[in-house]
Amino acid sequence: MTGIGCHTMVNFVRPEIALPPTHMGGEGTNWVGLAPYVGTDHVFQNMGDGTYFHSGLMAIRASVASGVNITLNSP
Ligand SMILES: Cc1ncc(C[n+]2csc(CCOP(=O)(O)OP(=O)(O)O)c2C)c(N)n1
């Protein structure tokens, strides 16, 4: 799953492997809603460094609190 920022351009070149982004600070929260309804066990979520310092920490906290299986990485 992509984050918002320049690295979102992966959606243009590999749309078959990347889901569209949320706003800054929402990274992974769309997976919180999707995870119970699909067969995928785990996702990777990109988050830019600017987003992390802006509001991304809140998104990480939301993923931890919900208990979803997700790995966040900074591209
Ligand atoms: C809540 C919110 N505020 C502002 C924006 C506008 N915005 C889109 S991308 C971006 C910068 C993201 O920077 P970074 O996370 O470092 O990603 P990079 O551009 O380096 O890939 C901003 C401010 C946004 N998408 N969401």
Image (spheres, rainbow, N blue to C red):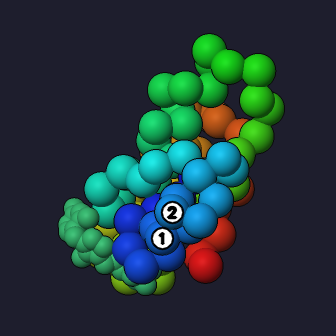
Q: Where is residue 57 shown, x and y percent of the image? A: 43, 65
Instruction: Report the front residue among 15 and 66.
Output: 15
Q: Is residue 50 left or right of residue 13?
A: left
* Res 39 visible: yes
Which residue corresponds to the image point at 35% horizontal and 59% vertical from the top-left? 25
Kind of residue indicated by mark 1: Met
Which residue corresponds to the image point at 59% horizontal and 65% vertical from the top-left? 13
Q: Is residue 37 left or right of residue 30?
A: right
Label 2 SS: helix
* Beta carbon of the mark 2 residue lies under 8 A of ligand 1: no
Q: Where is residue 40 shown, x and y percent of the image? A: 76, 29
Instruction: Report the front residue among 10 and 37.
Output: 10
Instruction: Report the front residue among 58 and 3.
Output: 3
Q: Which residue is mark 1?
A: 9
Q: Which residue is mark 2?
A: 12
Kind of residue indicated by mark 2: Phe
Screen quadrant of the C terminus? bottom right
What whole-number distance in Å separates the C-alpha atoms at marks 2 and 1? 5 Å
Which residue corresponds to the image point at 54% horizontal and 46% vertical from the top-left? 19
Q: Are marks 2 and 1 in contact (CB under 8 Å)?
A: yes
Q: Is residue 2 above or below residue 69?
A: below
Q: Residues within 10 Å of mark 1 (few under 14, many from 20)?
A: some
Q: Where is residue 55 shown, x and y percent of the image? A: 32, 66
Q: Where is residue 29 shown, x and y percent of the image? A: 45, 41
Q: Residues within 10 Å of mark 2 (few under 14, many from 20)?
A: few
Q: Is residue 43 above or below residue 39?
A: below
